[in-house]
Structures are given as C-alpha cells and as structure tokens.
Image (cartoon, rainbow, N blue to C red):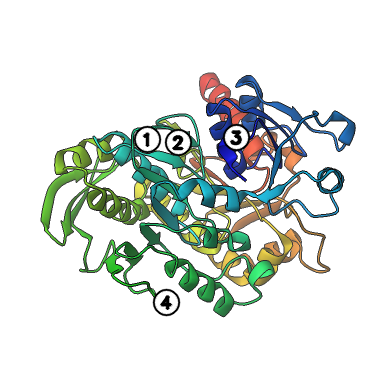
Amino acid sequence: MDLTKVESVYFLGIGGIGMSALARYFMSLGKKVSGYDRTSTALTTALQQEGITISFIEDVSLIPTGVDVVIYTPAVKEDHPAYEYFRNAGVPLFKRAEILGRISEHYNTIAIAGTHGKTTTTTLTAHLLTQSKVKCQAFLGGISRNYSTNLILDASSRFLVAEADEFDRSFLQLHPYIAVITSVDADHLDIYGNHASLLESFSSFAGKITEGGYLIIKHGLDLPLKLKSGVKVLSYSAGAECDYYPAGIGLHSGLYTFDLHHPKGVIHNLTLGIPGYYNIENAVAASACALLSGISEDELRDALLTFKGVERRFDIRINESELVYLDDYGHHPEELKACISSARQMFPGLKITGIFQPHLYTRTRDFADDFALQLSQLDEVILLPVYPARELPIPGITSEMLLEKITAPNKKLVQKSALPMILDSSKLEVLITMGAGDIDTLVKPIENYLKQFLQKK
C-alpha cells in the first residue's frame, strides 16, 4: 500500500506517545486523521486542538466512514471491537512500528534503542541536527521541551531520527544508517520471557543496520553482534576512555561541562543545558550521532547548551530555595537509581521524598528486590498502587508487598486520590514523582498545590 495515496487514517490507541507522533505526521501530509483511546489526556487534548477527531468510547458507530488504513498500538488486542470492525470490513491494519519502518525507508535513519536512556538521547540528537545545517525529521518518544511536540518536520533533510522501541520487538521494523544501543538491562520480560531473548532481539536490531552504516554502542555492553558488510562499531561512555567519551567534567550552576573526545580529536568547553549526571552519557551518544551526520563543532556546542530536555525526564518543575519538585518517567530500577542519585548529587544534604507508582504487575514481580533497593535510597517513600496498564492482577504482587521490602526510614502506601493533599504531612525539601502509568496526571496538580503552598509561606 502506498501510504502517500491514502486519504483517511484511523489510529487505535492514538494517545500513545509514538502513535500521536504518527498521527501528527499524517496530519502534516494533509490526510484526514481520527482515532480512539481509552482515556483523555493532555496529549489527546492537544491532538484534538490540532484538528484530530478522537473518541473515548468503545462504540464502532462513532468510527467515521471512508477510513483507508488503520494503525494500531501493540497494546490493542485483536478482540478489541474496533479492531474486529475494521478487519471484518477489509480495511488494512498495520502496527505502529511497521508504518514507522515504511516511512524511515526514505531517509538516512538514526535509530536510538535501549531499555533506558533512549528518549532523552533521541530528543537531543534531533535537537542537535535541527539546530544545525543538517536538519532532520524526528519521531520522539517524549515531548521535547524545546519544540513542545514529539514530531519534528523538515522535508529538506535526508535524515530521520527515531526512537527505536524494543517493546513487542517493534524496532526490528527499522533499517537504520546509524543505530545507538544505550542499555540492554532485563525488561519487558512479559514479552520476552527471559533476558537472553531480549539480548537476542537487540542483536537482531543491530543486524538491521544498512551496509556501510554505524553502530554506536555503550562501552562495556556484552552483546553478540552479526552485522552487515562495512558496518562500523563505535563505543561511547561517560566514565571510560573509548571512541567517544567526556573528560574534565565539571558542575557549574547546576549544569555539566566537559570536553568531548572523539575519533578525530577533542571538542573543548561543552555545556549540556539540562541537569542530571547520567545525561552526560546520553549527550555523548547524541553528539556521536550528530558528528557522524555532519554537524560542525560550533553547531554542536551551541545546540548542547540550548537543549531544554524532555517532559517527564528529570523534569524540574519547581526549583526554589525552600522546595524542589521534579518529575521523572523512571519505571525500571536502573532508571530510579539514575534519577535518585542525580538528585542527591544536585541537592546534597536535602531530604528527598519520592512518590512512586509501580508500572505493570509483571515488572513489579520481576524486579521487586531491585525496586526496593533503589527506593530505599530515599529519605521518604510514598508508594501508589500498581498501575496495571495492559495486565490483569497477579496474586501476591502488590504495592503492599513492595512496601514491606523497602527499608527507607519513612514509608507509606497511599491511594492516588489522596495526593497531593497527603503532602501536607511531609516536611518536603526535594520531591520526586516517578513512574510510567497515570501518575503523569498528578504532576500539574502537585505542581500547582506546591506553588500555592510556597506563596503562603
């Protein structure tokens, strides 16, 4: 099917971050775009304001006539009423990843994969290219704070930057010219079954790199590789000398400075515009992509400094002397570790309170001890019930079980409806909200509540 010739596109699960970027892309082509999602969010509201018709009711009578193609998220099952309706009507159905793969075939694609770190690295790579003469199109896994969107369009560029999602093996639909692998920690074991199967999938992703392309891989990752002819492997790190690494790291006014060593020399006096020590490593990977794509040293220096980050990635919402509030998408133990340790480094000596919403029963089960270990690094833990997403409950796998394992001196389990008022009982200095479920709906209410609290002081 020639996607350029379709007139009407329907999205099942349009509110997802990857789905919404595709919806915006087809809107930019002048197509009629509509869709369904279970719940209304800030993102679906934004799509509606951009002219996209969205239904939140499972009623096939609300589906518009004349739909040419349906794009659906892997979370939508084949017994979904709308899926069955379109299948019975003979309308072609495609997974999101397949459509992204088809679009990317027309570009030199930079695909960034990893169990964590990929969203910030993808968004920063897109920003570096956008602020240079190279330019790019980009499909992001988060909302860029520089551009207030998850889609960047520039038809003049031959480059496309895309977040490569390992969930449901989606990234195997891509054939990148440059690929990044940031991390391969065990995750999505509900899909893969075991860590070995996940590693095999990442190896297959690396095997998709086009002949003569590049694999930029984090130094020290043990991943068997079967690459096409002429693919060059380059390593990066924040703490080891390799192909791309920082030196002379300093912290000034909350931002990190460093010199970037790369295969052709050293670029001095770089400043990354967002906080978080772990973001230095993301910046090194993004810089490697950008330099290989042809941006200049001066363009790199200017763009790194102006990067504002991604919503829900170490996203500092309030930074006052009396109170700091930051929000993070972290939902894997390694992501919690990176977030909490960066907060400790940035705000030394202050009490850190964390609100965490576990995401998925299987992930909570598989990493319960690791979650407890990382959450125990907080001074105070406020735990929310498990967000089930696509899963049914698993007996014995609850937030109560996780709470028992946490050794932080002050811990409690509360219902989401009790926030943000429950914060009155905490003497807050630094507050972090963490999780990938619907905790994002609490961020703005908590921010507003805390700002009112500060005004009263």
Q: Nearer the viewer, mark 1 or mark 4?
A: 4
Q: Residues within 10 Å of mark 3 (few under 14, many from 20)?
A: few
Task: From the image, tell me which residue sits under label 4.
Answer: 223
Task: From the image, tell me which residue sits under label 2.
Answer: 144
**Is 442 left or right of 243, judged from the image as shown?**
right
Residue at (36, 55) in percent of width and height: 278
Amino acid beneath label 1 = Lys
Rounded to the nearest angstrom, the CA distance separating label 2 from label 3 is: 30 Å
Rounded to the nearest angstrom, the CA distance separating label 3 from label 1 is: 37 Å
Q: Nearer the viewer, mark 2 or mark 4?
A: 4
The answer to the question of whether label 3 and label 4 lie on touching residues, with beta carbons closer than 8 A, is: no
Which comes sooner in the sequence, label 2 or label 4? 2
Q: Nearer the viewer, residue 435 or 102?
A: 102
Residue 77: x and y, percent? 79, 54
Which mark, by number, is residue 439? Answer: none
Q: Is residue 108 above or below residue 448?
A: below
Which comes sooner in the sequence, label 1 or label 4? 4
